[in-house]
Image (tube, rainbow, N blue to C red):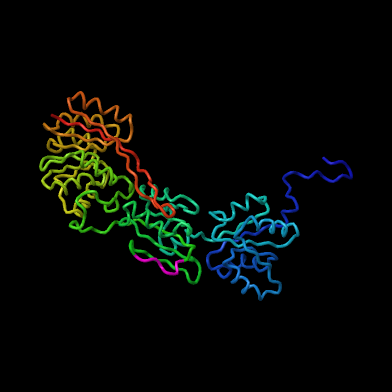
């Protein structure tokens, strides 16, 4: 304790006098001052120094000119120049307000402020973020939405995120790199134009805000606002005209997906290779084990209509999904069996196969392969796509021990992805292909 006549020791937890001079950081939408809540607007009008983006200053100057003591206005676009001004104003005891966009602590100036000022000097008043406003305009719940920022970043992560087929993806665009047009190019390069609705959102919260759904080939607005974001909303692709489709190698976005596992399908480049490795005969029986959405087996039927396709998939609802995809492509599987493939095959299941694509099975894959090897017809072939070397080491010996001629290959594919004024190659996951041929 302090002795008589001595001032008490200051606890290190007691705020310094700077606490009395707080910087009020107020978020707003594109409407600026006009759209602020009354309490936040009062703080702005009472400010001695008001910092805001340069684009808002003319409007603020006009509105605040009617105040008895209009605040001093400074631009906030260059924080390295702004922060010394704010520090001097706070030290002088002036009332300081910084007007920011949306939620200042979500991809806003809040992070920079916290790196320069003590937290006790700052008080944040967030407005709805641009994402909240965008989904509100569409009237769509957004608890399942994902987001990605391209500001100053390589766009490659967007291509990777799209391969996971999110239900909704908000993209914070970088106007310096192409903005919405960059997003459209990546969507097209991913083969997913038919699988997503693209919404362009500009000046959200402003009286002249604009929310447009853009068709894949539609022209962009001539007066496109540089500050915009894009929403990609997954939706069932429209039924294609089978006659207009290529012979094989259909875009990933043409396939109906499992709603809870939207990215779980064989990608186009891998599908093309597997169709080649299967060396499809004009007739015979094809098993597609672990068929997923049916993409490989159904494309095989388009190439060889005389084949008898049996698709096996364990996930609930898979039979209806595969049949729906078959109807879209105007092909007819001989059978679609929903359930555990090992149980189905142990009970007999479909006729003995001439070709087998063993794409599923997980931990049961070795047991499934043993059944396949027993039932594979003379001159039959089995093709097994694999993701790991360990799986290759497990499954290759049974093929060799059964006397099959074995081939191993690796497929590594890349897709072009926009990069500034050029194109870079974004890799897909490599796939090992194990193939056995029965003499």
Q: Which residues are magenta?
A: 218-224
Give coordinates of residue 233: x percent, y percent.
37, 57
258 drawn magenta: no
Residue at the location (54% across, 68% down)?
Answer: 31
- Residue 127, located in which quarter of the rendered image? bottom right
Q: Main secondary structure of the magenta part?
A: loop
222 drawn magenta: yes
Q: In which quadrant of the rendered image does the C terminus lie?
A: top left
Residue at the location (30% across, 53% down)?
Answer: 253
Give coordinates of residue 189: x percent, y percent.
34, 52
Give coordinates of residue 112: x percent, y percent.
61, 52
- Residue 88 vs 8, above or below: the answer is below
Residue at the location (29% across, 30% down)?
Answer: 392
- Residue 239, located in which quarter of the rendered image? bottom left
Q: In which quadrant of the rendered image does the N terminus lie?
A: top right
* Residue 425 placement, left or right of 354: right
- Residue 358, located in which quarter of the rendered image? top left
- Residue 153 vs 377, above or below: the answer is below
Q: Tally the numbered discs.
A: 0
Looking at the image, the residue that sits furthest to the front is 422
């Amino acid at each position: 304790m302090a002795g008589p006549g001595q001032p008490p020791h200051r606890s290190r937890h007691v705020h310094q006098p700077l606490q009395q001079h707080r910087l009020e950081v107020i978020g707003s939408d594109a409407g600026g001052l006009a759209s602020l809540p009354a309490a936040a607007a009062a703080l702005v009008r009472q400010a001695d120094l008001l910092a805001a983006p340069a684009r808002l200053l003319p409007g603020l100057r006009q509105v605040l000119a009617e105040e008895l003591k209009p605040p001093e206005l400074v631009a906030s676009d260059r924080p390295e120049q702004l922060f010394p001004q704010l520090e001097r104003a706070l030290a002088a005891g002036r009332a300081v307000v910084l007007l920011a966009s949306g939620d200042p602590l979500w991809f806003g100036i809040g992070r920079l402020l916290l790196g320069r000022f003590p937290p006790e000097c700052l008080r944040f008043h967030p407005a709805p973020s641009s994402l909240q406003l965008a989904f509100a305009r569409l009237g769509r719940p957004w608890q399942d939405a994902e987001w990605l920022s391209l500001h100053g970043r390589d766009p490659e992560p967007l291509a990777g995120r799209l391969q996971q087929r999110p239900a909704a993806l908000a993209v914070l665009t970088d106007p310096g790199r192409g903005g919405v047009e960059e997003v459209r190019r990546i969507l097209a390069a991913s083969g997913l134009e038919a699988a997503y609705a693209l919404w362009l959102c500009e000046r959200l919260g402003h009286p002249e805000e604009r929310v447009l759904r853009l068709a894949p080939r539609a022209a962009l607005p001539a007066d496109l606002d540089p500050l915009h974001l894009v929403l990609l909303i997954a939706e069932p692709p429209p039924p294609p005209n089978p006659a207009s489709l290529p012979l094989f190698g259909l875009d990933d976005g043409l396939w109906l997906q499992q709603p809870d596992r939207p990215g779980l399908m064989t990608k186009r480049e891998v599908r093309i290779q597997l169709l080649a490795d299967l060396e499809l005969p004009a007739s015979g029986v094809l098993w597609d084990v672990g068929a997923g959405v049916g993409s490989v087996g159904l494309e095989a039927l388009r190439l060889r209509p005389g084949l008898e396709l049996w698709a096996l998939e364990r996930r609930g609802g898979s039979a209806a999904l595969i049949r729906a995809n078959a109807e879209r492509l105007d092909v007819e599987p001989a059978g679609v069996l929903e359930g555990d493939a090992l149980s189905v095959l142990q009970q007999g299941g479909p006729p003995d196969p001439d070709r087998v694509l063993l794409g599923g099975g997980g931990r049961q894959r070795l047991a499934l392969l043993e059944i396949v090897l027993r039932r594979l017809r003379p001159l039959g072939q089995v093709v097994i796509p694999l993701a790991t070397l360990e799986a290759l080491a497990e499954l290759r010996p049974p093929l060799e021990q059964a006397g099959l001629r074995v081939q191993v290959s690796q497929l590594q594919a890349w897709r072009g992805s926009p990069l500034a004024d050029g194109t870079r190659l974004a890799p897909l996951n490599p796939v090992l292909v194990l193939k056995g041929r029965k003499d």
